[in-house]
Amino acid sequence: MPTLAFGKWRLSQEGSRYMAFLIVLGALLFLMAVAYRGHSVILFAPVAALGAVLLTDPSLVAPMFTGLFMDKMVGFLKLYFPVFVLGAVFGKLIEISGFSRAIVAATIRIAGAQRAMLSIVLVCALLTYGGVSLFVVVFAVYPFAAELFRQSDIPKRLIPGTIALGAFTFTMDALPGTPQIQNIIPTSFFGTDAWAAPWLGTLGGVFILIVGLLYLEWRRRSALKAGEGYGDPAKLINEPAPFAGGKLANPVVAILPLVLVGVSNKLLTAWIPAFYGSSHEFVPAMIGNAAPVVQEVSKVAAIWAVEGALLVGILCVLAFAWKPVIASFAEGTKSAIGGALLASMNTASEYGFGAVIAALPGFLVIADALASIPNPLVNEAIAVTALAGITGSASGGMSIALAAMSETFIANANAAGIPMEVLHRVAAMASGGMDTLPHNGAVITLLAVTGLTHRQAYKDIFAITLVKTAAVFVVIGAFYLTGWV
């Protein structure tokens, strides 16, 4: 009987494929279960990943741990840890400066307390469409989301779902032109640009926004009927400290740091590659013959831009609110950095988990099964969103799916007369569908920052996940019915 070899582990082909699939599925379900029950992903992501390796090839446990899991985990921290820290500090300064309270007061005057959820969704959308990292948006928006929900007496457990709708959905990958990485990755595979399929992307974005807001409003009304309010701040975790200063800042001044972060990010994204070129190298000032340090600017320009933009936002807060910020700076930044450490380590552990799972034979079984779906766009949508769900990463799952199957997608699309722009938009939107399962790094970060658990708040995040996933198939249906691109 033919055999399938993976390291030294040999089984019959049929039996090995079946077992390989069950091993990968078991690792995923295990990690989702422990995350949902509130256990540390930092501890259990390597346990789940290496448990799957142990059942596949015991001799590869140690090599995969150091050579793949830790390599990917440390690589993630190397790139993104400064973004987490600066984002957390920026969000804390927005809080202790009183700017969040000023923005909330202005929002209530303009939109009314009954539209608190809409206000938070729109603020998140403004920041993410302006290029601010999703993780940074969580840190920056939460302080005044908590303030607005508290004043409107809306249950705190609805904050994560509201932020998820504004930051993790339509402005992340649906609206044309968004600079988020999920909308950039398909360009290198399909030869498109960030504005691909503008009509379909806009339709998908509007669908997500309307249906998502209707769901959140239904949840708010249900809580109101049940007599449930925000909750006792003394018993809640990670509650933003009340503003201890005097007169509130002008709302225009208060929102200025948020606007500057978005504008600076846009400008720096264009300026950094023009200044440094495609690559940059320098020789460290050391005794002896030190090797030059070479960096590919194209791979780090977006990260440098976000870091620079956050520094601009921090300096803006300090310039306009020096006294209240300095009075609480030491204690405030300690808690912010502690939160950034936890959030970044959670996400990095997830990244390592996804890398290990993607290297197992069971992952190839899943990829092969997905490739058998006949309709080109449905095939692409299900493949991308399934792999994003397995890896717990929209960008990671899409990168794996397109690297393995993009040639097949392109050939099938050409045969069916489907433009590459439609493939781009479907792939981008599908990546942000089922990626937000309980083990997703952004979900864990969002819950950690808001001080809530999966049991308390994940139900609403998952509902938004379903809306986002459905939007992909709405877009596919619209294309076949109308031919819009």
Image: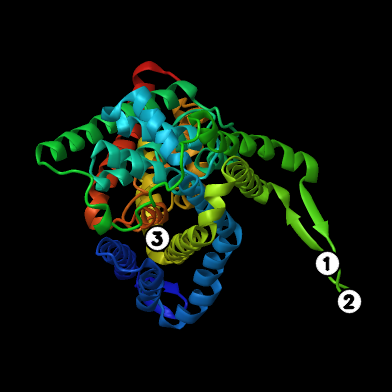
Q: How far across and down, in percent of the image, does residue 132 sit?
A: 53, 41
Observer-nearest residue: 223 or 349? 223
Q: How far across and down, in percent of the image, does residue 199 sit?
A: 45, 20
Residue at 22% across, 32% down: 217
Say if mark 2 contacts mark 3, CB within 8 Å. no
Residue at 70% across, 36% down: 270
Image mark for residue 287: 2
Q: Is residue 298 left or right of residue 425?
A: right
Instruction: Provide the residue designation for mark 3.
Output: 363
* Nearest to viewer (mark 2 / mark 3): 2
Instruction: Provide the residue designation for mark 1.
Output: 284
* Secondary structure at numbered mark 3: helix
The answer to whether residue 53 of the structure is visible from this angle is yes
Observer-nearest residue: 341 or 408? 341
Q: Gap between marks 2 and 3, in whole Å?
A: 48 Å
Image mark for residue 301: none
Question: Amino acid under label 1?
Answer: Pro
* Secondary structure at numbered mark 2: loop
Observer-nearest residue: 480 or 445? 445
Quarter holding the N terminus is bottom left
